[in-house]
Image: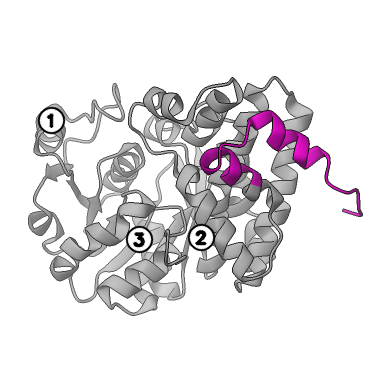
Amino acid sequence: MSKATVLGAGSWGTALAKVMAEAGNDVTMWARREEVAARIDSDHENSDYLPGVALPESIRATHRHEEALDGADFVVLAVPSQSLRANLEQWKDSIGPDATLLSLAKGIETGTLMRMSQVIVSVTGVDISRVAVLSGPNLAHEIASGQPAATVIACSDSSRALALQHACATGYFRPYTNSDVIGCEIGGACKNVIALACGMAAGSGFGDNTVASIITRGLAETTRLGVALGGNASTLAGLAGVGDLVATCTSGLSRNRTFGERLGRGGSMESAQQAANGQVAEGVKSCTSVRALAEGYDVEMPLTDAVHRVCHEGLAVSEAIGGLLGRRIKPE
């Protein structure tokens, strides 16, 4: 039996902990707050992030990372992208010398413009072959309730990817392996930004044609960036690209989609954040770093630029949409 440690007790970290326990692993969760860990241990439920979802009694929880990481074969990093570096600085000395590190975070780090796998290598010094990423149409509440879903586990070391695939496979959760870490990470980072744009459009009263157009053009600009960085276009046509994009852009369970809707209905950034109950809409921060990364590679990303200007430069949603519609016409 393999030991998996999930560092982070948000909705997605909790859902994957449940998956891995039901796949037959010995699972320990780390929660930043001691009271959250205690409730998971005593009630077998994470009432803060997945209320009403019964967790396997075999899952243990602690707020001490040294205890959680002791003997871990798989270390699942389930904290927001912009806090990953600071957390890793605290955790790195407790990670085993051959543990596989699996990133669930989706974003581009502000300032450094690093992908999450690059942040992990930079902080821990581990070989890139020990780092994997997971991406796909994976809404936490649906997976936690046992609804069928698929995902992609990308790692440059095929044996580690296969080991993780077996460690995450259940009757309702089907993982596929891939070697394209870059493509999976770019798809995961950009989809949050495009979901904000879809939410803004829906909140402004536009219908399915508009949302479908944003998804399609969003995929085009995501693919341009992924290929420019060395990723494969085929990856972005699969679960880690189209699959994740569609789920995040259309679901009411998507924090980024619902955050964008609040902005589209005329809400301020502050009111939208308050309504989100403190949960992170990753695209709000990622839009700036994705835009900067694209500029460095001379990649045109008009949707990402528009989202950044709404979130950080005070541009009205109506003006952003008008600006996109007013762009010059050209071949697809």
Q: Which mark is residue 102?
A: 3
Q: Which residue is mark 2?
A: 185
For the N terminus, the quadrant is bottom left
Identify whether 329 is placed above or below 204. below
Q: Earlier in the sequence, mark 2 or mark 3?
A: 3
Q: Residue at x 24, y 33 (%)?
A: 55
Three-letter code for the amino acid on which mark 1 is drawn? Arg
Q: Residue at x 56, y 61 (%)?
A: 292
Compare residues 293 and 214 and report the one nearer the observer: 293
Q: Is residue 321 magenta?
A: yes
Three-letter code for the amino acid on which mark 3 is drawn? Leu
Query: What x and y, as percent, mark residue 258?
Result: 52, 28
Residue 308 horizontal side relative to residue 128, left or right: right
Compare residues 128 and 202 and report the one nearer the observer: 202
Q: Quadrant of residue 216?
A: top right
Whether residue 244 is visible, yes or no, is: no
Q: Residue at x 11, y 35 (%)?
A: 41
Query: What x and y, as percent, mark residue 119?
Result: 36, 67
Instruction: Report the span colored magenta.
Output: 306-332
